[in-house]
Amino acid sequence: MISVMFPLLRKLSVSGSNLPSFRIPSWSDQDFNMTSNPAVQIPSKKEINKARKIYRLLETTFGIPEWREPLPAIDELVSTILSQNTNDANRDRAYDNLRTNFPTWKSVMHADPDKIIDAVRVAGLANQKGPRIQSVLKQIKSERGKLSLDFLRDLGKEEALDWLKQHKGVGPKTAAIVLQFSLGIPAFPVDTHVYRVSGRTGIRPHDMSVERTHTWMEQLFDPEQYGPGHLNIIRLGREICHAKKPECSKCPLNHLCNYYQGLGQNDRD
Ligand code: SF4
């Protein structure tokens, strides 16, 4: 599956993940900048209300998403590193292959790098992912004395995110996934689908960076909505709001969506 992602989403697997390459429609600046002072970048009440309407509509359409039992944080971290730039099936194959051939994280850490690369090759970018996985394991062991990320629960959220993001190959999305889905610390991961759908619907400023969108989404929703909201937006992105040729006519959000409302009648599918 996913653009992002990760085992958490196995139950929601649908094909495809694409970069956001949609044309910019003709909605007005006012539509984008509902915040009274864009420089401050705090969501307006209007944006928050719209986001929560979208949340409810997606819940009505898709239900409350379920996911498996949380993985230990290191497992989630490695799985998410493997998920980058590939689909869920290949991520899962690479992860299972790695765990089969190297049953402990210690054995992964000490393995011949070429063997780790071979084990994760099916996930693509194996020459990067293999060394990054070994490097992050070595750093965890050398800094913490054991291969566990449980200590992150004792840090503040921002400190935990910063600790994870200091490692090569661990960006804001990967760090947020580990916090939200493994450590139980509310965080809103933004993958390519969340970024695309939030931009098209207009619940974030169109020129906002992916990294900033993480905290923006957290400002739009309540913490208990982060996980279900993230998963349902991803599902919409995979099944309906495709990067190319979104199927707007069957989208439950079309009456709220800036992109759709900006299309001329002839461009609507
Ligand atoms: S109306 Fe179209 S562009 Fe808007 S969220 Fe739905 S599928 Fe995406």
Image (cartoon, rainbow, N blue to C red):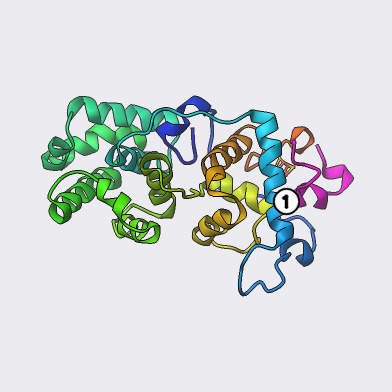
Q: Is residue 266 magenta?
A: yes
Tell me the amino acid under the disc marked 1.
Answer: Lys
Residue annotated with mark 1: 50
> Where residue 265 appears, x then y in whole percent?
88, 44
Q: How busy is the neighbourhood of tag 1: few (under 14 within 10 Å), some, or many (20 plus)? A: some
Q: Is residue 152 left or right of residue 192?
A: left
Q: Residue at x 51, y 47 (%)?
A: 191
Q: Residue at x 32, y 54 (%)?
A: 164
Quarter of the image for residue 125 reads top left
* Residue numbers of the magenta segment: 252-269
- Where's ligand 1: which quadrant? top right
Q: Position of residue 71 (x, y in %)?
A: 33, 34
Decide which of 260, 68 is in the foreground and name it: 68
Query: Residue 73's image quarter?
Result: top left
Residue 200 image point, x, y percent: 69, 51
Identity of the residue furthest to the right in this view: 265
Element on which disc 1 rests = helix
